[in-house]
Amino acid sequence: MNSPVAIGIDLGGTRVRAALVTREGLILDRVEQPTRASHGQQSIIEQIVNLARGIVKRADPPSVAGLGICSPGPLDTDAGMVLSAPTIKGFTDFPLREELQSRLPWPVYLENDGIAATLGEWRFGAGRSVDHMVYITVSTGIGGGAVVDGNLLRGRRGMAGHIGHMVIAMDGRPCPCGNRGCWEASASGTALSKMALENGFADGIQVFNEARDGNEAALQLVAFLSRQLGVGMVNLAHIFSPKKIVMGGGVSNALDLLEPGIRHHIEKNAMPPFRTITLEKAQLGDNSGVIGMAELVFSANTFSVHMEASE
Amino acid sequence: MNSPVAIGIDLGGTRVRAALVTREGLILDRVEQPTRASHGQQSIIEQIVNLARGIVKRADPPSVAGLGICSPGPLDTDAGMVLSAPTIKGFTDFPLREELQSRLPWPVYLENDGIAATLGEWRFGAGRSVDHMVYITVSTGIGGGAVVDGNLLRGRRGMAGHIGHMVIAMDGRPCPCGNRGCWEASASGTALSKMALENGFADGIQVFNEARDGNEAALQLVAFLSRQLGVGMVNLAHIFSPKKIVMGGGVSNALDLLEPGIRHHIEKNAMPPFRTITLEKAQLGDNSGVIGMAELVFSANTFSVHMEASE
């Protein structure tokens, strides 16, 4: 097999994942480590460089098209900068792309993590061949991105898709961002964990397990979370008019439990023409980001080739 | 002058506007009438046909590229249908484009009104040469549209941009759509009128006039409305990452009064990288829709010509 591969890296506040990915979205090799989030910028740069070099050395592909890395943000992808990533020490106004580019032999690309995962699911996951979709990831926070009219949305400085900080309840629960009533303040995995503790459960996973066994208190929490998720999804339906919402992140593992409540909310509160929207679990699991970043590398290369050809 | 013109029609629940527009966005002729909203479908079709024929007869342009009409919705622009427009009698699942096309000699195009006005302001108004913008119109309700990465967003069935039905206050004020807490339920001209009456003012215009004179109760209503508008604008900033928000509709005439409160809210509650967003009054006034629809006609024609040329 002589076709090139791309390196996709998904840098998170707790885990960093690196994968070698083919043009067809297949993962040839993959490594995952805890992020050295508290050790500062240079330690993380070193970790990423070692991961990338290591995975290439091990798999020894015929050629590497580039390295794409996504990170929590907001990032300014035009400038290649992490503007602020509170979960990673030293990642404030940090030129991540340049720092990596100066140490690596392949072209380096940077993207916000929500947009990267959207691209992965759109090209190779639950959003394949859908021209209008919204991807949401519900885990510690809520992030995501959108494809409208067959285009992946980036926005000014590549910062579109910060949908977790859409206020759905003015003056509601405090959000880590400093505002109140953000979607992620009431509908994220963190919000669920907090409610779980307040109601005598160990964590969100126990809530879902006991809800499956018919525990009434657990079912009420599931109903509450479903409604919170539903409010945000109806907003996104009215704003983007997607055909499909794809849901990833840890909480999506309980989508079977949550979906009836979400669906009920959509039927009741979306304007009638928007009610036919479908909801589907992400298909790439933890790999939406790395596969999306590899796809970004390949499409950037294709674009460059076209540009040269037309000159 | 031999260049073609396009007919732009903006059909509203109370007024219908028709204009002959050049490729450069200049209005050559314009007519405005009360909409025969209570007379049923055929009466409105007749009204639109007479307006179009009349304006063409009077100006006698060398050629007409087409007729573009926008209407309140939601519309399914792919199918050329008005799905539901509560303010116009009989406009439910109504094939508006076909009904007009069968009576007129020019190609007929249909678009949701918020998207049409967005296109007008983007090409010829306050959003000129901006690749990332959101247009909002604040009048009876709240509508709008978005341009992201240099593309006007349409979404599935052309229904993107129903931003007035983004819930910002779960379980809040009832909205005409049947839901509660929608943005337009607390931040539209209608919401202001209601608050004006409750506080002893005749209407929203009196509120703005007395606020200009320093009336404390009026200033409090202005502050309240500014905050409601600010919440929705911060949401749209996080979702689309626009460079600029352009505000049209009757309430935008008081933007000078509202802007300090909106700006304060943005500075306080948007995530830091989003705070540099600018806010500007729409420049085309009542003509955003007709100019946008004419532009749509011209760009559709250009596209067809290209398609033929490449076959």
Image: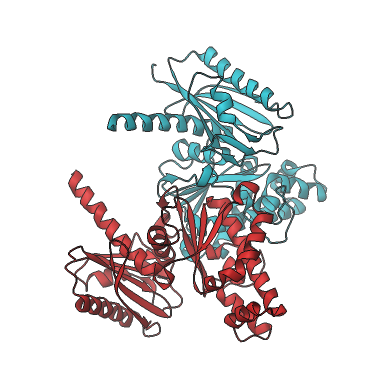
Chain colours: A cyan, B red
Looking at the rendered image, the quarter that the N terminus of chain A falls into is: top left
Percent of width and height locating residue A257: 64, 48
B242 vs A177, nearest the viewer:
B242
User: Where B238 falls versus A30 (above or below)?
Assistant: below
Question: Which residue is painted at 58% across and 59% down in the image?
Answer: B233
B175 vs A159, nearest the viewer:
A159
Question: Which residue is painted at 36% across and 64% down in the image?
Answer: B292
B111 vs B20, nearest the viewer:
B20
User: Where B104 falls versus A5 (above or below)?
Assistant: below
Question: Which residue is painted at 47% across and 58% down in the image?
Answer: A276
Please give left or right for residue A204 compared with residue B45 in the image. Answer: right
The answer to whether residue A136 of the structure is visible from this angle is no
Say which quarter of the image contains residue A80. top right
Looking at the rendered image, the quarter that the C terminus of chain A falls into is: top left
Please give left or right for residue A6 compared with residue B271 in the image. Answer: left
B137 vs A167, nearest the viewer:
B137
Question: Which residue is painted at 61% across and 23% down in the image?
Answer: A48
Percent of width and height locating residue A59: 51, 14
Say which quarter of the image contains residue B264. bottom right
